[in-house]
Amino acid sequence: MIPNLASPGWAVALIFIPLLGAMLAFLLPRIGVTLGLLAAVLTAGSVLPLLPMLAAHGATNIRIGGWGAPLGIELSIDGLTMAMLAMTALVGIAVSAYATCYLRPVPSRPDGQPDLQQRHFWPLWLVLWAALNALFLSSDIFNLYVTLELLGLAAVALTALSGGADALNGAMRYLLVSLLGSLGYLLGVALLYHAYGTLDLGLLALRVGDETVTRAALGAMTAGLLVKTALFPLHFWLPPAHASASAPVSALLSALVVKASFYLLLRLWLTLFGDLDSGLATLLGVLGAIAILWGSIQALRQARLKLLIAYSTVAQIGYLFLAFPLAATGGAVVWGAAVYLVLSHALAKAAMFLTAGSLLRFGAHDRIADLDRVVHRLPITIGAFTLAGVSIMGLPPSGGFIGKWLLLQAAFSQGRWGLALVMLAGGLLAAAYVFKVIGYAFTPAVVPHQAGLVPPTMEWTALALGAGAILLGFAWPLLWPLLEIGMPFGALAPDPGAAVGPWLGGPRILAP
Amino acid sequence: MNGTFWLPMLVLGSSLLPGLLIFFLAEDRSGIRTLLNLAGAVAKLLAVLWMLWGVYNGVAYEARLPFLPGLDLVLRVGPLSLLFVVLSTGLWLLTTIYAIGYLERSPHRSRFFGFFSLCVTATVGVAMAGNLLTFVLFYELLTLATYPLVVHRGSEAARQAGQVYLAHTLFGGALLLAGTVWLYTLTGTLEFTPRGFVSHLGETHRGSLIAIFALTVVGVGVKAALVPLHSWLPRAMVAPAPVSALLHAVAVVKAGAFGVVRLLYDVFGAEFAASLGVTGPLAVVAGATILYGSLRALYQDDLKRRLAFSTVSQVAYITLGVAIAGPLATIGGLVHLVHQGVMKITLFFCAGNLAETLGIHKVSEMCGVGRRMPWTMAAFTVGAFGMIGLPPVAGFVTKWYLGIGALEAGQDWAVYVLAGSSLLNAAYFLPILHVAWFRPPPPAWPHEHDFGPRETAWALLLPPVVTAILSVAVGLFAAAPFSPLEWATLIAEREFYLP
Amino acid sequence: MPDTRSTSVPGTVRARALPAGPGPTARLILLLLLAAVLVGLATAVLSLPPVAPGLGAVVTEHLPASGVEHPVTAVLLNFRGYDTLLELAVLWLALLAVWSLTPAPLAHEPTANPMLAALNQLLAPLMILVAGYLLWNGGHAPGGAFQAGAVLGATGVLLHLSGRRLPRAVDGWPLRLALLLGVALFSLIGLAVMAGGAPFLTYPPASAGGLILAIEAAATLSIAATLAALFLGGRP
Amino acid sequence: MTPASLYALVGVGLIVLGLYALSVHAHLLRKLLAFNVTGSGVFLVLVGLARRTPAAAADPVPQAMVLTGIVVAVAATALAVVLMLRVQATCGRAALNDDLGTLEPLQPPPTPPAGGPAASAGSAEGAPPALTGTTAHAP
Amino acid sequence: METLITPGNDAWVAVLNLLLDGLLGLLLLWLAWRTLASADLFRAIVLFIAFGLVLAMIWARLDAADIALAEAAIGAGVTGALLLAALARLHPDRPGTQARPRGSDAS
């Protein structure tokens, strides 16, 4: 069989291009930056061929080592995986471009070696990217544990890279929390393996029943993953870690890493634990609601921009968990809304942190009250922040609006007034803290200070991500058929032969 | 077929595209900026007139874009939407000329004109929205586009005003969104249909329909500056004059009033709303707003704040006319949409002229200004007479139709409200005229700019004079075929009271 | 950011007392919570059927095709080889993270401790022999890359403690290459196999044993280097 | 209490012990010990439950999983140790500090331009950051 | 190490095995508790190494020879060494292992 590159097997390239890139960048630090950027471009590019392949074959499984489900490990690609891979590629390529300028401080080292941060950022970031892609692709629960661990350690190392007391403290707490979460997840894996004799998600979905061991596994795995997703009671580690890391790293943490554990929880819920009528769905909904209110109020109280954005992440994660109680009767569209919120939050939050980085480079501080007339000294940065803010607030025409509209629709049709009220209040509170920042962008600071130089690539990458979050608002008719490939939200496990969504019929844009 | 698709998009794009381009223009390229602005305005006016002729002959213009499962973004141009589109397009052309003159030396003009064009795009979008979802989308876009203009000066006061403005409008937007989604879950469609698409629900959902009406009307009422929700308008006067003129007197406030009209006629249907018993309270609130606005205007020494409170009361005429829901009252309400726009913009232009040329902001400083700037004050006087409701000027036509409509619908109290408010209008406009014309001018004006032979720059003088002439023309030739009154009667016949 | 990482003894900031632990009520809540976890897990564990379906039978059925006799090594390097590859990546990542955090604190000068030096003379060759045996033995008996790597790593630590330093020439990229060897070789073999159209990591049955041994050898070397470097605690 | 799941129960006991110690002790080294104990507990559950298979074919898959787990645990512990030393070097104690977030940012507030560029992040002569002054408790 | 529970074995050996497993389990739990609750850090680490060795024995009892080797070499050996080195670096002014005043850094 001639090695045709379009065969699904080559999805593995998504994991090994960044991994090998990281190794090369580690081996030859002097040219680490160029190698890193090249690997980033290649990885982002290798997501594209998957799209037509997915459209042609529908959801596909790749048998690593040729051994097949019970014995070997399988990777699976369906609509949900594709969306997550595309999200990671988009945010990844933007942050990579941003990092090339952000991390090169003024006096580079005399002996020509790139600065310490610059040298280690690229290998760590590429390993993180490989771990993300591996996690999205894998459909074997123990393999997911190893990717979770790889992801956690890489994220901690990146957080600690900026070296300040805050960053190291945040990184330490993040490491402990991340390891604890992974162990909780592993305990769940152990229980499931010994109850049903297999590690593959597809087979487990057919064998899982409503026994006490499944509930214990559900409890352990959910607890572990909630710690890593920083849902309300377990969110204490997120703001210090995300705020003290350097700007491109906090963008990666808030936009991608937190979403990976949410994706995993969603995947487990859809395939294994969905129809267990445990009260967990309502519990997650309640915690999500509290997270929205508490996170937004905390964000409003912050005096520093990066802490404000970090608390905004805590609030927006609350929105994602509202989908659990609503989807019980709401059906696949509610899950579609949750995924849509994940995608638009990733783009918007990454844009926000990148703008925070530009403002930090511009004024050497990120105190909101002292943003000295940045609206016309850095128009593109504030424009990006506003576009991202529109999506975070859920105002039309952004992706956040689509997610919020569909969740509101489910809440109203199921008569859950409380959730609807929380969503609206969350939107208003988000508007309060976003416009608090934009308002101060117009006014002069108490003590005017002269400006640092902000390279244009930093501003334009942030604007591109912000515009992406807005364009998502119009992309639902394009993305929904893609998300439905392989029926990830259907009750059945993703079977390869699933009928392909009307995606093949071609998008109906501006039909005259 | 595609002609009817591309025209609405052209109307939308003719201000969106120049707006986006202007954002990236350097500050000193004023030539290109003016060209872009005027080209956009003229193109939009031509497209609108083309559609005016088309709609008059019964052509249906519609553009549809898939947006959500089962919901599309729809731009549909009917007689009602055209009324508002013509108003905002015409006045946008005049205000652009005015703004170019007004902002001659001030900084950040690219940013200003960029957002200015986005505002008009949103206003035209609100007017042409074919269903409630598109309406909500452009309604929120209008908030986002006007905020930077309110905060344009960059002072702490401007920021505070901006925060108040946002608190109100975003709160309204959230309520409107909640009502819209709730309605969609009940009816399954949001398309504007002439006699409302809610009546088939009947008694079963009476409670929730009333709640939805309350949510959506309050959401829209914030921008229509109905009494409890009006306090953002006077504070938004901190914005530069062109912003106060076009946006806070015409575009934003009218979007709110237009929203009330859409809700009452195209969502709930006049009869069904009356049967729900919601039009009564709405009429009372409108009446209260009329009186309250006029009363507050009496005590404002700052000219623009007085005009702002006058706007609060005048816009409530539209809501009153529509809430009374008789055919004649509806015509009165609809036609006031145009009349109030034309008259109020004249007043704001004159206020801007006074501020820009002589540095006058307060009524007490306006002694003898008539001698110094006769043309401006003449336009101001015409506008003031219109507001009071003296016959030749447009205001009289509205009050006449509202009065007859109220009597026809048996709502006698409305006539007393109208009479009372006319008196109050006179009470706060005539002193201004008296001070301006019959008082000796002070030795020196606060800080006078010399604009050469004419009293002020031509770009500042031309617009108010033109709008003053328009106010009189609309009043005199009310019966002419394409006049606002005729068009309002056509709307009433076609859309609201089908035979 | 100011480079507060001084290479001197790290105590640049005055020591501070430990924060107080949780109060009595907090401990009570904690105990209750943990009691619930204990009971939950215990019932779950006890509720499992006495005889488990396990994958043991499937493994033994496919063992001959795996190119190795010992089932655990077969699972580790063939059936679930992808896990092991990622695990080697985790180990390398940990090292990368440690190196990104801090340069190695000044390793205390070689303490002229004759006892340790003498002990090393004896132990080092012995441990290398044991490591080699474990590596070779992994194919058909308990043993394999990790255990051999650990023993070899321990040897490295002992040599470091007794004052021997890596020669300057090896310190640069050769060390980095040794650290990478395990993951790099495993990935490259996995990808090379795909050229023949087979899915990722499908060893051709004939040369499976040889390939696994090569991977094990490379893994042992890089695990040993990584564990020793981790013990050092920073960039050399 | 069949002998088969005896070790699994011991594992559960270890997990609970580890979790208790992890949340009670403030010193980071003790937290690391607790983490390792919890990890061993989970591994014990993983292999302890495997003992229920018929004795002839001992199930190798859990053993492979635990081997991977042990190596991952070592890697995590090594990283945690170095991070702990760095935290102690910069924050003065080998424990988590919650009050850092409210600290004034490292560089001094923007002095008027005449006072030299305030924009440079932190004074160059490497003076220890503002930590020493603000949160010095009695040692 | 002959297999544990085979039908042919008589009850006496089964009880013996149960006793041995019980004892090892209890020893492990006791060691864990002592490690986590001991006042002095150095003592805690040494107990942790002992814990690792007992755990290695339990792996052997569970027919997991590979894990026993790995646990002994990596779990007890490398981790123990790492922690001891960390302890030494934590208090550079108080070198090495001589007993420190009790409770110097007790929780």
Image: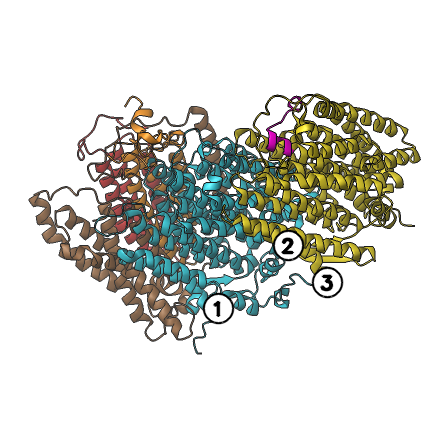
Query: Which residues are the magenta region?
Result: B352-365
Give the secondary structure at mark 3.
helix
Cα distance between the residues tagged 3 and 1: 45 Å
Residue B204: image x %, image y %?
83, 42
Which residue matches tag 3? B3
The residues tagged by marks 1 and 2 sit, at their Cα atoms, a distance apart of 43 Å
Question: Considering the image in quadrants, where does the N terminus of chain B appear?
Answer: bottom right
The extreme front residue here reads B453
Mark 3 or 1, which is nearer the eye? 3
What is chain B's hue in the picture? yellow
| Tag 3: amino acid | Gly
Question: Which tint was used for chain A?
Answer: cyan
Mark 3 and mark 2 in contact (Cβ < 8 Å)?
A: no
Q: Counting other residues with Cα less than 10 Å from the Cα at mark 2, is it few (<14), some (14-19), or many (20 or more)?
A: some
Q: What residue type is labelled 2?
A: Gly
In this rendering, the answer to whether D138 lies above or below C170 is above
Chain E colour in the picture: red
Q: Earlier in the sequence, mark 2 or mark 3?
A: 3
User: Quick one: which chain is brown?
Assistant: C
Residue A8, label in figure: 1
Q: Where is residue B127 in the image (x, y as percent from the top left)?
A: 72, 47
Residue A38 seen in this snapshot: yes
Q: How is the image coloured?
A: by chain
Identify which residue, A361 or A84, lies in the foreground: A361
Q: Is residue B354 magenta?
A: yes
Q: Mark 2 lies on which chain?
A: B
Element marked by disc 2: helix
Q: Residue A21 or A203: which is nearer the viewer?
A: A21
* Residues behind callouts 3 and 1 on a single chain: no
Q: Name the residue under label 2.
A: B13
Colour assigned to chain D in the rendering is: orange
